[in-house]
Amino acid sequence: MEKFSFRRVAVPLLCFAFLFVGCVKKKETTSATPTPAPSSSNAGPTPAPAITGKVTPAVVSQDENSFSRYLHFPKDPAEAQRNSVVQFYCDLTEEGVVEATYGLVGQDEAFKAAVQTALDWGRFTPATLDGKPIRIYLGGTVIFTHDEKGAPVIAVSLATHDRERVGKLVNYIQPQLIGGLRHEVAKIIRQIPHNFPVAGIAQAVVEVDDKGVLKSTKVIGESPKGSGLGDLLDAAIKGAQYTHAYDNGKAVGGAVDVVADFSKL
């Protein structure tokens, strides 16, 4: 089976629709008490300055422990004949190991399970700052398709938000959140009372320029609705630092989807 990190061919996104409610299974909370946002006297962190040192993004490695080498089509013959697309959102450690998976988005549970297995066992080449490995929040898309002869093909794009680039499988890496999502959320949680839900999800979009400087954030949704988790996530991502996007190795601006499963934070 052919596996690679990107391929210069146009691959349709197979009618895949990104839906907030499909990020992770909705969890019931034990309390309907909304999460308090940081108080107006301390309304979240000051926006972090852009990274001044040399930074490299996390990428899909080519070694024997690579995430890509653990990807496979479902074993069921009927399922293996289908095409599918799965997006994933996770924190990576300094070793390139997946510390937590915050969301898997796709229409087929068998393919989502295949991606989760690869995340559990495989590794990425870690991001670095001034040559030292660092933690990172990473989003990506796995495309399961077949070539003209019907042979299975798996492609990985380290992008989720720019679906045109994902569909064409161009050499593009979207921005990545430096330090990992768990670290940034923990800083905000320390500023608020302790009666916040232990389960729930929120989603936002972050846009940065070609130096990684934050341009805008937008909360897309939260579950449970009215829980305040969207405000909490927004405060966290506004205080974070980011890599810029890479288009054929060139620094460019870009956007990244941030999905937070608070039961794992």
Image (cartoon, grey):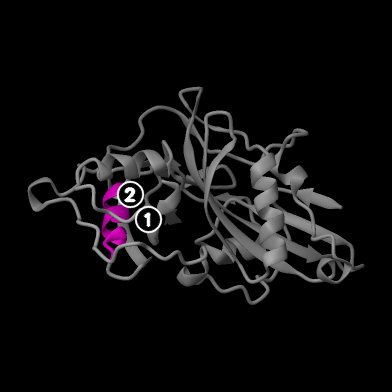
Residue type at tag 1: Val
The structure residue drawn at horizontal position 65% and vertical position 43%, both measured from the top left corner, is 120
In the rendered structure, are the residues bearing label 1 and label 2 in contact, judged by CB atoms less than 8 Å apart?
yes
Give the magenta range: 227-236
Q: Residue furthest right?
A: 149
Q: Nearer the viewer, residue 243 or 34?
A: 34
Figure quadrant of residue 112: bottom right
Q: Position of residue 220 (x, y in %)?
A: 37, 67
The structure residue drawn at horizontal position 52% and vertical position 29%, both measured from the top left corner, is 94
Q: Position of residue 38 (x, y in %)?
A: 17, 51
- The residue pinned by badge 2 equals 237
Q: Is residue 40 left or right of residue 2?
A: left
Q: Is residue 245 above or below residue 112?
A: above
Q: Dot 1, crowdedness within 10 Å: few (<14), some or many (≥20)? A: many
Magenta stretch secondary structure, dominant: helix
The structure residue drawn at horizontal position 68% and vertical position 58%, both measured from the top left corner, is 113
The structure residue drawn at horizontal position 75% and vertical position 50%, both measured from the top left corner, is 71
Q: For marks 1 and 2, give the CA distance.
A: 8 Å
**Residue 235 part of the magenta-drawn span:** yes
**Residue 254 visible (yes or no):** no
- The residue pinned by badge 1 equals 206
